[in-house]
Image (cartoon, coloured by chain):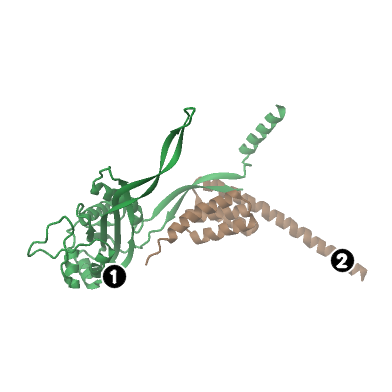
Amino acid sequence: MRTAKLLASLVVAMGTAGCLSIVEVSVETPIKPKLDASKFARVYVAGFIAGGTEDVDTNLETVRLLRSQLKNKSSLRVIEADVQPLADLAVKAAGLAPGPAAPGTAPAAPGDAPRLAIRDERDMLPYEKIFADKEYWKGVGEEYQGALIVTGSVIFVPYQRSGYVQKEAEVYDSFGRRSVVPVRTYMDRKGFILKPKFLFIDGKTGETLYSETYREEILYNTEQSTPALSSYFELMDRLLPSFLSTLSSQTIKGTRVLLR
Amino acid sequence: MPTLKKVIGWATVGVAISATAAGAGDRKEARNQVEFGIRVASQGLWREATYRWERAVELDPTYAAAYNNLAIAYETVGEFQKAKQAYEKAIELDPKSIYIKQNFDLFKEINDRANRQAPR
């Protein structure tokens, strides 16, 4: 008993005398932005070439979302202006022939811009030539005082996958005791894949400064009915921090141990 | 001649004793610098702490704790390359310290993330 008391008082004494050999501290580690956007005062989200389902207007939804995020979380002034008709321009620039309309959509009316079904990256390729057109982007930049231009493509497609999934199931033994065990079950699941490609173009030169491609997917039980727009926002939420870290520095909070 | 040998011998011993005394003095000063650095770092004054720990490793280049603290200080100002070198030195000097390894692992996660962000 006496020994225990002695030890306890020794620990307290060591602590008060600052003799403990470790000190845990909170740290905030800064991560520099991926792109040095210091020479730009404004940013213009010019629009996106959209592909996949027509349940969501991925072009306009992405423009709205990125503009609001950049307004709140970057130091750049966001230009609120109409989006560029990129798909139409790409069709004209690349001399593409109109293809079949996406399933479930009405065929293009005479006089409308030719509508091509973009289902995947391969369909998107011919359209992407527009992003390399420096003169075009320089022209856009001149209109918006040499702003940093954000553009790219967004593919949002329905997706279905069947296979074994691991679930937890309750089981009772002969004594009525309950336990939870992992069970592999064959399931049909459906959801969406979101594949955006973001390009950051210098409005003064028309050159692409940085680009990044993402892929996110979400799957639900076939009985679950989730609107396409909800899935779109859920998937975008996952990649927004990375998108924003292109232009703004981030701080990661954590703890470290200092030693004596 | 034997007298000269004795003189050289005593002189060598004298130099060795004074060098040890200076070494001990440096180590004590290095510990003071580390202690002061911890105090100011706890108040968020990382620049001052960095200076103190840089001084500590100059005085005692075998002081693993000082390198560990210095690495943390470099992390907080975003100097990842310097932080990596300081952690590696700390581990080299004290490979058994779980604290240094833990700090280094946490740093590597952030460093990898930052490196994935290399612009095209």
Classify mark 1: residues with Cα within 10 Å, few (<14), some (14-19) or many (20+).
some
Instruction: Write down the residue under mark 2.
Output: B7
Q: Residues within 10 Å of mark 2 (few under 14, many from 20)?
A: few
Is residue B77 visible from the viewing direction of this image? Answer: no
Total numbered labels placed on residues in the image: 2
Quarter location, residue A242:
bottom left
Chain shaded green: A
In front of the other: label 2 or label 1? 1
Q: Name the residue under label 1.
A: A207
Q: Nearer the viewer, residue A75 or A220?
A: A220
Badge 2 amino acid: Val
Q: Tell which chain the image draws in brown.
A: B
Residue B92: image location, x then y, percent? 62, 58
Q: Which residue lies furthest to the front in this view?
A: A174
Question: Are the two marked residues, 2 and 1, in contact with CB atoms closer than 8 angstroms?
Answer: no
Judge whether A84 appears above or below B33 on screen: below
